Image (cartoon, grey):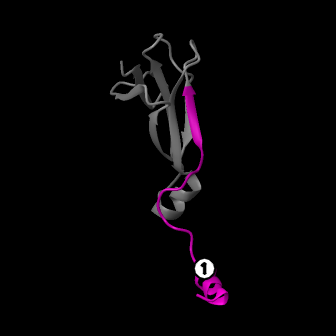
Amino acid sequence: MPEKARLEITKGKREPKGLKDRGKVRLECADCGRALMEFQITRNNADMVKLDGSPGPVTTIVQAHCGLCGGKSYRRTLEGQFHYGPADDALLCEYEENAPEGCDVSFNVRSKR
């Protein structure tokens, strides 16, 4: 394909819709310092208003309980939409039904072994 034709095809290309990498947030145990969870931000609040027509910003306060030492992470405020997972393959993270007061979502993180 000639160089000019290739440039014309990509010139009008729009940014793909769907999930985008908007950064990561890591939760660490406040007591033992172990990395417990990572949150991948996929839509920030500006994206959500544009794509979904949602009325306002989405803010979620998260906290993780460390099953290794019995401690907790500090609470973090996440803005927008996110996906979560363990910080490494040796850990499991489970959503807890009853979050502590002042927290929207809580997770229990424990070792697979």
Residue for point 33% across, 27% down: 97
SS for callout 1: helix
Residue for point 53% across, 56% down: 20
Query: Could you say where residue 54 lies in the image, as x and y percent from the top left?
Result: 47, 57
Query: Could you say where residue 21 lies in the image, as x and y percent from the top left?
Result: 56, 52
Quadrant for the C terminus in the image? top left
Q: Quadrant of residue 15?
A: bottom right
Part of the protein shown in magenta: 1-27
Residue 69 is left or right of residue 98, and the answer is right
Q: Quadrant of residue 101?
A: top left
Is 90 above or below relative to 1? above
Tell whether position 19 is magenta: yes
Quadrant for the N terminus in the image? bottom right
- 110 and 53: which is toward the camera: 110
Q: What residue occupies the far front of the structure in this picture?
A: 1
Q: What residue occupies the far left of the structure in this picture?
A: 97
Is 113 above or below relative to 26? above
Q: Residues within 10 Å of mark 1 (few under 14, many from 20)?
A: few
Query: Could you say where residue 13 lies in the image, as x and y percent from the top left?
Result: 57, 77
Residue for point 35% across, 24% down: 98
- Number of numbered callouts drawn: 1
Where is mark 1, residue-wise? 10
Q: Amino acid at mark 1?
A: Thr
Tell whether position 73 is magenta: no
Is 58 above or below relative to 99? below
Residue 108 is left or right of residue 39, and the answer is left
